[in-house]
Amino acid sequence: MLADLGISDISELFSDIPEKVRFKGELQIPEAVPEADLTRHMGRMAGKNVNALDYACFLGAGTYDHYIPSVVNHVISRSEFYTAYTPYQPEISQGELQAIFEFQTMICELTGMDVANSSMYDGATALAEAAAMTAAKTKRKKIVVSRAVHPEARSILLTYAKGQGLEVVEVGCKNGLTDLAALEAAVDEQTASVLVQYPNFFGAVEDLSAVEQIAHKHKGLFVVSANPLALGLLREPGAYGADVVVGDAQPFGIPMAFGGPHCGYFAVKKELMRQIPGRIVGQTHDESRRRGFVLTLQAREQHIRREKASSNICSNQALNALAAAVSMTALGKQGVQEMALLNVQKTQYAKQQLAQLDGYEVVYDSPVFNEFVIKTPHPVGDINKALLQEQIIGGFDLSRDYAELNQHMLIAVTELRTKEEIDRLVKGLEGARHA
């Protein structure tokens, strides 16, 4: 190889790198070992991780332990899906295109919107993309977002806003919900959109009807980040006049996997169809009038003049979108509703049991989906360490993102949690109080 390149030493490959910035010496990495030894070593390291198969998991905050139908992995592991990339050639990509089309259709049914794209990277970037799209559509620079929106999503929103010169105004919370009076005071003629989460980061169900009136009062756009599983039970955002509905499809068929990868969805009213980021799969007919599918309406900078693009998102999560579509199909409409209902019922049971526990307090009284907040007698980190000793993964420490919520824990209860596990959590929290 060196001879073909016309060089005598591998160091010549780095001749363009100035000598003074080149690393000298040996990297501090272990010596090479046989493959069998390395496999055993990695297995021992992996065995140190706590997982939801062995421990009862009450940690949510954006990634949830939900039931995944066994058929999901069978379908997405097929080579024609597992290795597929962008289906630019529709004549050989009909299976991939149809799967994405079905995903789009089911997202529209859940959200009550007219059009959905083929997926986004995750729910957080989908929300930031929605804010950017509303600014481009309205020619306004102000984005108003509730502090009850996921902290990581708000952080990504701020990153997007800085690059595009947008002003982000955060509105506080009251009793675990968006403060409507503060929201109304923050929204004006310069507001491009209002962003809320449904249910919000604390698990509470926002009053979308009231938020919609405020968002549209000055002709801004109304953006809702919604948990798609919750929409199996809650009224869809489209029925409340939402202009854009985004979210994370992780609850459907996508494992927690240490926090990713996920799959975002993005749905809009028909009048915003040409501003939607990413790509849309459309249904058409070939010259023989047979049904077919193609990529269409791509509003990104790879396909149209850069100054007219509303996004530079250049890919999607096709495999995870397929997993979500297979999961929704396997569950069916009734199954999704039953799964959502179990989340509500089990969460209510956990709330009732914890409300009777000395030293703990359920702090908000608003309706919740599968998460709720409790006040703890000791720092959440200490309590979670005690719970781990009982093979329980505790809730999320809210003080990490909300200084005013010191010693507050966000607990997630999904349909997979059993009564026995919830009772164990209550007993474990009681024990942690005396630790």
Image (spheres, grey):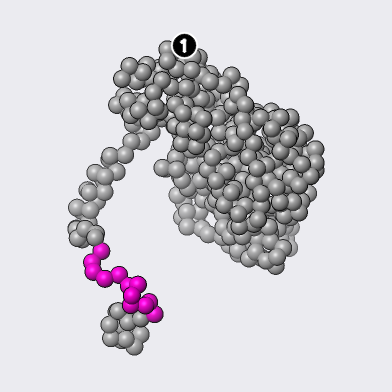
Relative to 236, residue 320 above or below = below
Q: Residue at x 65, y 55 (%)?
A: 165
Nearer to the camera, 150 or 333: 150
- The reply, left or right, for residue 424 in relation to residue 330 is left
Image quadrant of residue 220? top right
The stretch of residues the image draws in magenta is: 16-27
Where's residue 153, x and y in %?
56, 43
Secondary structure character of the magenta stretch overall: loop
Q: Which SS class for mark 1? A: loop
* Magenta segment includes 217: no
Where's residue 312, x and y in %?
61, 60
- The reply, left or right, for residue 418 in relation to residue 290 is left
Q: Which residue is mark 1?
A: 356
Image quadrant of residue 189? top right
Residue 338 is at least partly visible in this image: no
* Magenta segment includes 25: yes
